[in-house]
Image (tube, rainbow, N blue to C red):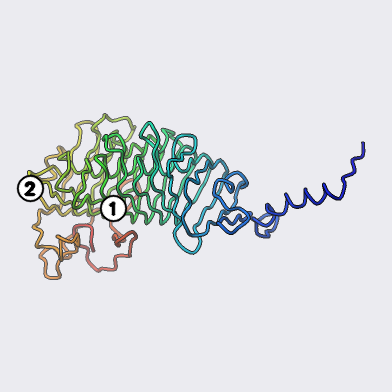
Amino acid sequence: MNIKLSGFWVLSLFLLWLPLQAATTDHAPDQPATIQVGPDRAVNTIASAARLAGARAIIEVDAGSYVGDVAVWTQDELTLPAVSGRVKLIAAGAAAQGKGIWVMRGGQMVVEGFEFSGATVPEHNAAGIRHEKGTLVILNCAFIDNENCILTSNNPELVLKIENSEFAWNGYGDGLTHNLYVGTIASLSVTGSYFHHARVGHLLKSRAAVNHIFYNRLTDEAGGQASYELEFPNGGIAYVVGNVIEQGNRTQNPNIISYGAEGYRSPKNELYLVNNTLVDNRPQGGNFLRVKPGELTLKAANNLLVGRSLLESAGVGEYRNNYVVERAEFINADKDDYRLKRGSRLVGKAVDAGSANGVSLQPQAEYLHPAGTRVARVKSQNPGAMQ
């Protein structure tokens, strides 16, 4: 049967097709499509882009504030860069599938330049991002004032990578929500990122099988009420290298780093604590490290400790070249500048920490505030995080 369309219907279909065509830039058949999102573009909401995008798409979002613009992403190999500045996603009571601002359920996904804020739901566990499937890479993002910032599912195939990002003022205040809460996933990598002022919960809590925590600043600071600064409740492999980790003076928990407190569940339980600067500001004193007894490997080397306790109180392990120091050893500890003074007796006193499982434990960089890293170009390394 032949169907003939009138001129009116031909024009109507053309007008429906035109905005979708205008939303994507020209691309070769083997190149990913690009969708441009912004208030003045054909696709003016992120939710619309999430419905339109196919696999391997690049969704470029213009800088600005997007209020209540929540989305579910199910496509594979998506890249979502902010364009010409920060994109601010403000929940304002909206939540995709009752979970958070974004629900990520695709494959390989890269997100760069976004700020997620205000995620709330009646159950009090909303997240800036709920990561439920695949590999998620977070670059130069911020998570501010959410009940959780990123909350992962307990999927042993998940991978989460975070670089040069900020996490602050997250948590409902019940101790069950955190600045960053990672479930039983395959691996977590966090580099060059700034964690501070969690609401009662932890600055970073991870149940991942393998954790790479390199060159970050986890400092609760003035007014902070975080519990642990860093927790691996079920053990696993954790490389904690080159971080400044500071317990605030209003904490509700004396422990700064906790490992295995809820029982060991991983086939390998190894903690490598190397070249960190650990600061205890709790007036009555706290513990730098709490480790549940069990079958595990514990290696701590080249750490600087500002406080009253010793790392060795954590139990059996290999402890090398860790120093208890006064705040006066640093350039300006009162303003969180934990670089050693030029004339410090500790300059150049680090020892070779070797490697573990093929991962070098020698710091190659240092944290650069407010979120980033810089290469450490020194002939002989210092103990502590700052080279």
Q: Which residue is mark 1?
A: 361
- Residue count near mark 2 (Cα–Cα under 10 Å), binned few <14, some 14–19, many ≥20: some
Q: Which residue in the rendered view is the most extreme toward the front?
A: 8
Instruction: Compare residues 13 and 115 and report the one nearer the observer.
Output: 13
> Could you tell me which secondary element the residue under label 2 belongs to?
loop
Residue 153 drawn at (x, y percent): 42, 34
Q: Which residue is mark 2?
A: 308
Q: Earlier in the sequence, mark 1 or mark 2?
A: 2
Q: Quadrant of the C terminus?
A: bottom left
Q: Quadrant of residue 125?
A: top left
Tell me which corner region of the image, top left, top right, bottom left or bottom right, holds residue 296.
Answer: top left
Q: Is residue 95 left or right of residue 368?
A: right
Classify residue 96 as left or right of residue 189: right
Callout 1–callout 2 Cβ contact below 8 Å = no
Q: Nearer the viewer, residue 45 or 53?
A: 45
Q: Amino acid at mark 1?
A: Leu
For the N terminus, the quadrant is top right
The residue sitting at 28% across, 53% down in the picture is 361
Q: Write the residue at 47% across / 58% down.
A: 64
Q: Secondary structure at mark 1?
A: loop
Rendering coords of residue 337 (x, y %): 19, 62
Question: In the picture provided, is 273 more to the left or to the right than 36?
Answer: left
Q: Disc 1 vs disc 2: which is toward the camera? A: 2
**Cα distance between the residues tagged 1 and 2:** 26 Å
User: Residue 307: x percent and y percent?
Assistant: 10, 50
Residue in view at x 51 percent, y 61 percent: 83
Where 102 sits versus 81, above or below? above
- The quadrant where residue 23 appears: bottom right
